[in-house]
Image (cartoon, grey):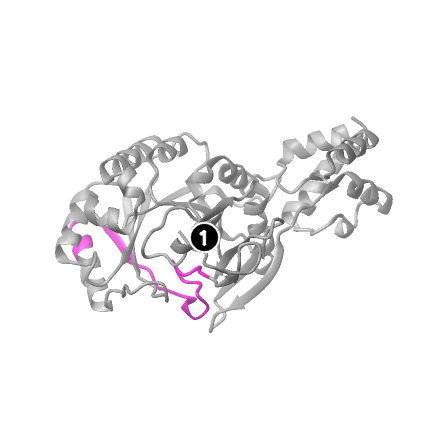
């Protein structure tokens, strides 16, 4: 199809083709269909994914005439940047982005790590997360997921780490998530190593098993937070549908298929899940598993009365795990002064689309 044909098709559809979200093969096809030279595909991939050009106007090694032709049939659909908040000390930055339909999402940069959202809102309703009250709006597209990385990595020297721990449950948006992962990982696109990429989930067994078959050596992190079903169902309603036995079985399957260590996230909440018995139960459940536990002090927020475990309790809990043979680390919280710490992505926005208070979460 010629450039004229593509333009006619875009006019009939009342929309231009969004190249952000196309992988190298799709961009190659677009270039071929447009009647352009093959080398234009690499130029477009480099500008969109490696240099983060926000529009064709910045693609200076393309002639002005070609840029105008491209603009007539296609676009680079970038997220709208609304606000950038910097924590004291400067090590943590929170970004507020606006989607084309008016919904807003948040992302965070912690040193050289980018925390990425996969949904606008979240349906999981975990009681320790500030986003639970906002409800679910929609899944993000591959381009909306990838563009968070494209925009934020400009502020990082070298290759960043990518963690899908922002708003939403990544594995509920499986296909779009994995296409974004391929865009981030592909040498023709962002070229960020798979071992620098971590997917964090509340524990969806069927999707974890599906992930085990992906030919990408990324990292898996599972939000656990309790070692018995009653307590985990209170903290994480998803456990009522997917109890611990099925979650652990899917993780065992994942480890056997990939031979990769799994991380568990355990939010430490005073008087809720930080007892000696909790530590013993957790040690027993994870015994002999290829795993690591990240103990995360609960980050207080105004929508919850929960309190973080004391530093002494955190250390005691960790020591019990380590003595039993389970690797464990206490994760240091950062960004609390701008509500960017784990579980705090909860900006009070003017409506998801129009103007009333809304809260958004980090899974």
Label 1: few (<14), some or many (≥20) within 10 Å? many
Q: Position of residue 245 (x, y in %)?
A: 22, 36
66 to 312, vertically: above or below: above
Q: How many marks?
A: 1
Task: From the top left corner, tell me how far across and down residue 130 is, in percent.
Answer: 39, 59
The residue closer to the viewer here, 187 or 147, is: 147
Residue 255, quarter of the rendered image? top left
Give the magenta part as a residue range.
Answer: 320-346
What kind of element bears circle 1?
loop
Q: Residue at x 66, y 51 (%)?
A: 51
Q: Is residue 333 magenta?
A: yes
Quadrant of the image containing the N terminus = top right
Q: Position of residue 246 (x, y in %)?
A: 26, 35
Q: Position of residue 104 (x, y in %)?
A: 55, 55
The residue closer to the viewer here, 227 or 128, is: 128
Question: Is 33 inside the magenta-drawn segment?
Answer: no
User: Which residue is under mark 1?
Assistant: 166
Q: Residue at x 52, y 38 (%)?
A: 176
* Side of 23 where 131 appears, left or right: left
């Amino acid at each position: 199809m010629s450039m004229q044909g593509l333009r006619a098709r875009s006019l009939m559809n009342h929309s231009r083709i969004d190249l952000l979200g196309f992988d190298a093969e799709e961009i190659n096809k677009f270039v071929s269909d447009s009647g352009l030279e093959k080398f234009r595909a690499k130029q477009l991939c480099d500008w969109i994914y490696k240099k983060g050009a926000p529009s064709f106007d910045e693609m200076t090694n393309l002639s002005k005439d070609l840029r105008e032709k491209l603009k007539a049939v296609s676009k680079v659909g970038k997220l709208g940047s609304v606000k950038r908040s910097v924590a004291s000390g400067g090590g943590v930055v929170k970004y507020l982005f606006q989607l084309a339909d008016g919904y807003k999402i948040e992302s965070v940069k912690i040193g050289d790590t980018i925390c990425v959202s996969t949904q606008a809102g979240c349906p999981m309703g975990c009681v320790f997360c500030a986003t639970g009250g906002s409800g679910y709006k929609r899944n993000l597209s591959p381009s909306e997921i990838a563009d968070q990385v494209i925009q934020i990595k400009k502020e990082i020297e070298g290759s960043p780490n990518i963690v899908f721990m922002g708003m939403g449950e990544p594995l509920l948006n499986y296909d779009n998530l994995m296409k974004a992962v391929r865009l981030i990982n592909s040498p023709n696109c962002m070229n960020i190593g798979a071992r620098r990429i971590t997917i964090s989930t509340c524990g969806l067994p069927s999707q974890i098993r599906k992930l085990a078959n992906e030919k990408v050596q990324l990292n898996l992190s599972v939000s656990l937070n309790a070692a018995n079903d009653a307590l985990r169902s209170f903290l994480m309603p998803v456990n009522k549908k997917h109890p611990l036995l099925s979650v652990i079985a899917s993780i065992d399957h994942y480890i056997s298929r990939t031979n990769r260590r799994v991380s568990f996230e355990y939010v430490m909440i005073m008087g809720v899940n930080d007892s000696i018995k909790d530590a013993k139960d957790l040690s027993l459940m994870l015994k002999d598993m290829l795993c690591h536990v990240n103990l995360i002090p609960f980050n207080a927020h105004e929508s919850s009365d929960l309190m973080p475990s004391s530093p002494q309790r955190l250390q005691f809990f960790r020591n019990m795990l380590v003595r039993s043979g389970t690797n464990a680390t206490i994760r240091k919280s950062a960004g609390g002064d701008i509500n960017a710490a784990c579980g705090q992505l909860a900006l009070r926005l003017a409506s998801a689309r129009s103007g009333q208070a809304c809260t958004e979460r980090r899974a």
